[in-house]
Image (cartoon, helix red, strand yellow):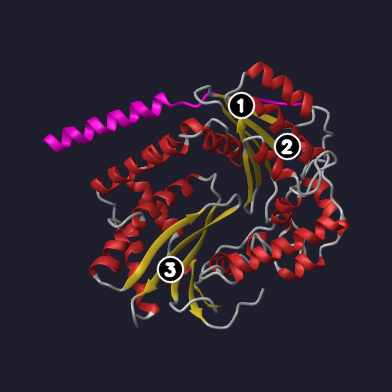
Amino acid sequence: MKNKFYTIACGLMMTAFVGAQEVKYTEYDLDNGLHVILHQDNTAPVVTTSVMYHVGGKDRTEGRTGFAHFFEHLLFEGTKNIERGKWFEIVSSNGGKNNANTTQDRTYYYEVFPSNNLELGLWMESERMLHPVIDQKGVDTQQEVVKEEKRLRYDNSPYGQILPVLGKNLFNVHPYKDPNIGYMKDLDAATLEDVIAYNKKYYVPNNAVLVVAGDIEIDKTKQLVKDYFGAIPKGEDIVRNYPKEEPITTQINAKAYDPNIQVPAATIAYRTPGFTERDAYVLEMISTYLSDGKSSKLYKKMVDKQKQALQVGAFNIGQEDYGMYLVFALPVGEVPLETLVTEMEEEVAKVRDELISEKDYQKLQNKFENQFVNSNSSVEGIANSLARYHMLYGDTSLINKEIDIYRSITREEIKEVANKHLKPNQRAVIDYLPGKKAEN
């Protein structure tokens, strides 16, 4: 009884804390279509200035893969008013830090400065949008940088090809079939004209969201945003019409080879709904139930008890149009990959066939409450979340209410969604093996 009251008390405390940490923000559009979100938090003298563009690896034509990631690098080259190679020097010499990253769906740039350098951050991002210098020298330089990154992180990294292999086997016509970083031959073939056209199409204010978060004054920041971004011309409307995939109705069997590994991997992959769909939230809970931590079902069974796997995991890989759901294991010794697949499927089947226990359900809810609190624990994280929820989910307010979606998911719904998306005839079983270099 004492433990029961303790659990209830902890739950009430967590709920109260979540309610108390509501993120307040102001959002509006400039005349050129740039969406602006401002979040004031004066607890520390820092400010994050970020721009997210709705362009990722999937936004390309055949034979020109990897452009979004290439641009992530290229747009640090320099601008009309920032000398080539000086971007990072300007940031660091003014007490700041910056970075960027690209997914299949969006590209994100940000700077973090002491709040007295707010205007510097706005100026730099407006320069990136309005005045990038795109010339042959920059293209040649960044082509080599990106190709070296591809070699380091994918081609020569143990298990670095797993995600591209999943995409290749789960998608036939959608651009997700190709890796976000692209293929070497496409990077080599890119011309200056290709690059200029890509910039003109996607790096426009009406395809972007600007977030300023931290130690700011809202009215003053609004005026600065207008001063630096208001005159940037609006681009053409972007129309996306990617081909739809036919459902997977028969198990796909495949092999892939990685010269950088000695231990093979058994992988089971499913094509799942895009991350805005409610089912994607449920799948996120299922992956946590199966493999988050040493007390999870797969780890306790296959690593601790049966000593079959060195490592095991289940991951819901969220994307805008379709997701990918991966269950994988690395064998101990000579344990066959087929055995690992059988054991993993047994645990997935339990989720399809039985309600998870009330105890496990409450444990899941506690984990997601904790994740939600942590996601909004820094100004940097808040800036990213505000941009992402607006651009990719179409609902900025999810920064405060997404946890309500997880709270509303029932044990019955978990079983229902597993039955809808995680059946054996809907999967790809891929033996990921040591050996010859994968073609790229």
Structural distance between the alpha carbons of marks 1 and 3: 54 Å
The residues colored magenta run 1-30
**Amino acid residing under circle 2:** Glu
Q: What's the CA distance linking mark 3 and mark 2? A: 47 Å
Q: Nearer the viewer, mark 1 or mark 2?
A: 1
Image disc number at residue 115: 1
Mark 2 closeness class: few <14, some 14–19, many ≥20 residues within 10 Å: many
Image coordinates of residue 136 in percent, x first then y, are: 87, 58
Q: Earlier in the sequence, mark 1 or mark 3?
A: 1
Does 430 appear above or below 143?
below
Find the residue positioned furthest to the front. Answer: 93
Principal secondary structure, stretch drawn in magenta? helix
Circle 2 sits on which residue? 125
Residue density around tag 3, few if under 14, some if 14–19, many if 20 or more, within 10 Å: some
Does dot 2 land on a helix, a strand or a loop?
A: helix
In this view, 437 is above or below 293:
below
Q: Please name the amino acid that badge 3 sits on.
A: Pro
